Image: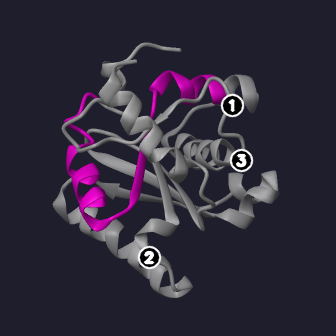
Amino acid sequence: MNKQISIEVEKHKSELNKWYQFYVGLDIGADFHVAACIPFEKFRSEKEWKRQKTMKFYSDGKGIIDFLAQLRNIREGFGLDPSDFFILLEPTGGHYSYLVMKVLLDEGYHLFQVENKSVKDFRERQLGLNEKSDEIDARIMAYMGWHKTLHPDMKGIRLVKPANPYTDSFSNFNEG
């Protein structure tokens, strides 16, 4: 791992050890994105987090504004700020996720990326689920964020905090 990336990883380890009020999994698509915004306490029951409703929104500016409005409603309803949200998404070569990443980072949300393969492996190996949908993957990414917060040294899930929406964080270092 090069020195700059090592510094960035160390700098954001404290964010991984923080308890967040909400975990958001964001499945990125070309035309629309799907988000699962799950409160911390819902992960205590497998039935609860797996049945949480998801938000489907277009990947354009209007869709992202609608998504931000939903997050704002949750924040205001619980008296929270953006730093109380752990948002996890897959890198998609940059262009599909660029706008939503830029807006979320600019708004102050804690944004992390997880490799696409890790989501599939976690879904199949850890949870025993073979079915796949955008909604399922959004919930699983929220669960992965929560799980990684509880077990920061857990192997198989590597989370990276992007410095900016232009960065494909995983292209900078090898699997360890």
Task: Name which of mark 3 and mark 2 comes first in the sequence.
Answer: 2
Q: Residues within 10 Å of mark 2 (few under 14, many from 20)?
A: some
Q: Which label is found at residue 154?
A: 1
Q: Position of residue 170 (x, y in %)?
A: 36, 24
Q: Position of residue 76 (x, y in %)?
A: 46, 86
Q: Is residue 108 magenta?
A: yes
Please say if 17 is above or below 161: below
Please name whichever residue, 113 or 151, is drawn nearer the observer in this view of the structure: 151
Residue at x 35%, y 66% (from the top left corner): 67
Q: Are marks 1 and 2 in contact (CB under 8 Å)?
A: no
Which residue, given by chain and number where applicable, does mark 2 sit on? 81
Query: Percent x, y for residue 125?
Result: 72, 22
Taking the magenta stretch, the answer to whether it contains residue 166 is: no
- Give residue 90's position: percent from left, percent from top: 41, 36
Query: Quick check: 80 left or right of 93?
Result: right
| Region of the chain picked out in magenta, as a range | 93-122
Disc 3 to disc 2: CB gap under 8 Å: no
Kind of residue indicated by mark 3: Leu
Q: Give the camera-side residue of 62 and 77.
A: 77
What element does badge 3 sit on? helix
Vertical placement of residue 59 versus 151, above or below: below
Q: Residue at x 71, y 30 (%)?
A: 129
Q: Quadrant of the N terminus?
A: top left
Instruction: Let me know if residue 59 appears in the view.
Output: no
Q: Residue at x 33, y 40 (%)?
A: 29
